Amino acid sequence: MVHLWVRAESRPNEDRVGITPDGARDLIRRGFRVSVEDSPRRVIPTAEYRAAGASIVPEGSWPEAPPDAIIFGLKELPDDSSALPHRHIMFGHAFKGQPAGQTLLRRFRAGGGRLYDLEYLLDDHGRRLAAFGYWAGYAGAAVSLKSWAAQQRGGICGPVGTYPDKDALAAELRAELDATGQPRPRAIVIGARGRVGSGAADLCAEMGVRVTKWDMEETAHGGPFPEILLHEIFLNCILAQPGCPVFVPETAVNPGRALRVIGDIACDPTSEFNPVRVYDRTTSWAAPALRVAENPPLDVMAIDNLPSMLPRESSLDYAAQLLPVLRELDTIDAGPWGRAAAIFDTHLKGLQP
């Protein structure tokens, strides 16, 4: 029997979940055992999982879960350097040379566990089977426009938080843009045909922002891309990976540009493949924008858990995409789970002592 253990998220400002009560009920009917950690922050109340038939266990109790349990979360584990003996499903951010990712892999090596990275849960053609991309793009574009509006007021973007729904976010943002008294800025979205880019472009359209939509055809020549500097807003929606061109080089901080805000929604600044070279660290909900140049100002928005600004919409969307794949956990050595395991094994073998 597959035992899926849904852990409570420990990261601040993380209210999402990867399975709904209806999804838990579906798995239980198929013979799965589902344990759900209690969480006062999760956007879906614990009581709804209890009503669906899941066993409710204490928050943070996953290290004591039975050895055969598969631990399922979204964001990173607490960084306590403990060995990891279980199988884990989550976004590990460990396969592109990230320093924190190397530490995570060493924890798995020490404990004998295995990581099934949600980013690498792929179909037969190498396409991701489930992603938060649309809502990452939507929220990332919103915070980027908030950053532009703050510049018009002579400041920098202040703290952001969660919203009950996208309409509340859109209403607040529209009021901020209107209050500047300025025409809407121009934006360029790279990766416009993907989930992330679609969400970013849709938010811009709702706000009356003109959007230049680029994808692989427009970037195939490898750069440079001076057109980016002619827009006030640049939204990067392309994941960093080998062969990715540099969209914004270090020299982009120089004067003579229209560019004022970079929304690096893909947000992988510590990767050697990072296509936005004017910054080196993520930003946060408390400080969403990092100023990398003055006269004229240039701010970078690089929050790495943007979908949690809209936790209900993003959770329901993602869980619906992922449920058919979770149903295949009873054949975890085959299909997408087997492919994800092989990717983990390859990186574990290449891990330095």
Image (spheres, rainbow, N blue to C red):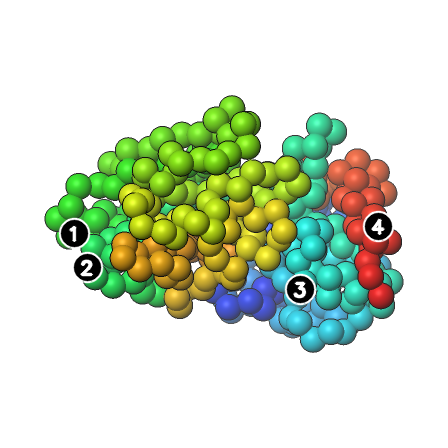
Q: Say whether disc 4 or disc 3 marks the residue closer to the N-terminus.
A: 3
Left or right, residue 126 beside residue 69: left
Assess disc 3: are there few (<14), some (14-19) or many (≥20) residues with their C-alpha within 10 Å of its C-alpha: some
Number of the label disc, if any, that sits on residue 153: 2
Assess disc 4: are there few (<14), some (14-19) or many (≥20) residues with their C-alpha within 10 Å of its C-alpha: some
- Proximity of marks 1 and 4: CB atoms separated by less than 8 Å: no
Left or right, residue 288 beside residue 8: left
Assess disc 2: are there few (<14), some (14-19) or many (≥20) residues with their C-alpha within 10 Å of its C-alpha: few
Disc 3 secondary structure class: helix
Residue 5 seen by the camera: no
Q: Say whether disc 3 or disc 2 marks the residue closer to the N-terminus.
A: 3
Residue, disc 3: 100
State the image quarter where residue 213 is shown: top left
Residue 305 in picture, x, y percent from top left: 50, 56
Question: Which numbered disc, 4 or 2, marks the residue closer to the eye?
Answer: 2
Residue 118 in picture, x, y percent from top left: 67, 47
| Amino acid marked by disc 2 | Arg
| Amino acid marked by disc 4 | Asp
- Vertical position of residue 55 compared to residue 253: above or below: below
Q: Residue at x 68, y 51 (%)?
A: 96
- Proximity of marks 4 and 2: CB atoms separated by less than 8 Å: no
Residue 320 in picture, x, y percent from top left: 57, 40
Q: Nearer the viewer, residue 178 or 254?
A: 254
Query: Separation of disc 1 and disc 3 at Cα?
Result: 40 Å
| Amino acid marked by disc 3 | Ala
Q: Nearer the viewer, residue 52 or 270?
A: 270
| Amino acid marked by disc 1 | Thr
Question: Which numbered disc, 4 or 3, marks the residue closer to the eye?
Answer: 3
Residue, disc 1: 180
Left or right, residue 229 beside residue 23: left
Disc 2 secondary structure class: loop
Number of the label disc, if any, that sits on residue 345: 4
